[in-house]
Image (spheres, helix red, strand yellow):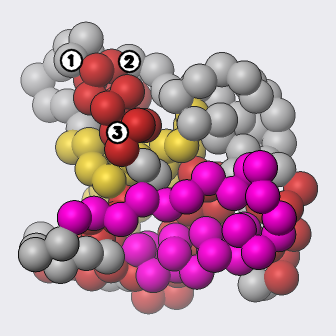
Amino acid sequence: MTVSVLFVCLGNICRSPMAEAVFRHIASKRSTVSFSRLDSAGTCAAHLDDPPDPRTMSTLKKHGITDYTHAARRVRTSDFTEFDYIIAMDRENLDSLLSTRSRAKGEKLAEVRMFGDFGADAATESEEVPDPYYGGRDGFDRVYEMVTRLSNGFIDYLEQK
């Protein structure tokens, strides 16, 4: 099976690039699924073409992910036909993505999910990946821990399909 995944947060400089980098790193080491494309984007255009937040990059580096590069971009309607999965970091971004998806045209549109769906059991609500932008470095460490756990859960999900 070959899969393409787009990770999405608000500005595409903290959570979604970290999720993309961590997922890419974990998938390269343990996944039996092939990935044709992994990317990240934001639902707003405030940081277009900016690199990830320096705290994102230092958190990745601290955990041995040193080869990640990215320029922030905004979600496009065409993403819904180009990706198999579009993964939102929180409910606000999920709502925005579902609204954009309703305008997309194509025979097969991406499945839009919360990243937290892959860490929750059926009896609990999906958890949100919190935005660490206005906080300290500990928020980035927390996001790293979450996206690591959720990446493993998402890979488990894909391997069972």
Tell me the residue that label 3 is attached to.
94
Determine which quarter of the picture holds residue 141: bottom right
Q: CA distance from mark 3 to mark 2?
A: 14 Å
Q: Is residue 31 left or right of residue 132?
A: left
Q: Secondary structure at mark 3?
A: helix
Whether tag 3 and tag 2 are in contact, CB under 8 A, the answer is: no
- Circle 1 packing at 10 Å, graded few (<14), some (14-19), many (20+), is few
Q: In this view of the protein, can residue 11 be seen by the observer?
A: yes
Sequence-wise, which precedes: disc 3 or disc 2? 2
Q: CA distance from mark 1 to mark 2?
A: 9 Å
- Circle 2 packing at 10 Å, graded few (<14), some (14-19), many (20+), is some
Tell me the residue that label 1 is attached to.
102
Amino acid found under the numbered disc labelled 3: Leu
- Circle 3 packing at 10 Å, graded few (<14), some (14-19), many (20+), is many
Q: Is residue 156 above or below residue 13?
A: below
In percent of width and height, residue 93 lies at 42, 37
Q: Nearer the viewer, residue 124 or 156?
A: 124
Q: Is residue 103 above or below residue 139?
A: above
Determine which quarter of the picture holds residue 84: top left
Q: Nearer the viewer, residue 118 or 65?
A: 118
Tell me the residue that label 2 is attached to.
77
Residue depicted at x 29% and y 71%: 118
In percent of width and height, residue 63 lies at 75, 84
Q: Which residues are magenta?
A: 125-151
Q: Residue furthest front?
A: 135
Amino acid found under the numbered disc labelled 1: Ser
Residue depicted at x 54% and y 43%: 9
Q: CA distance from mark 3 to mark 1?
A: 12 Å
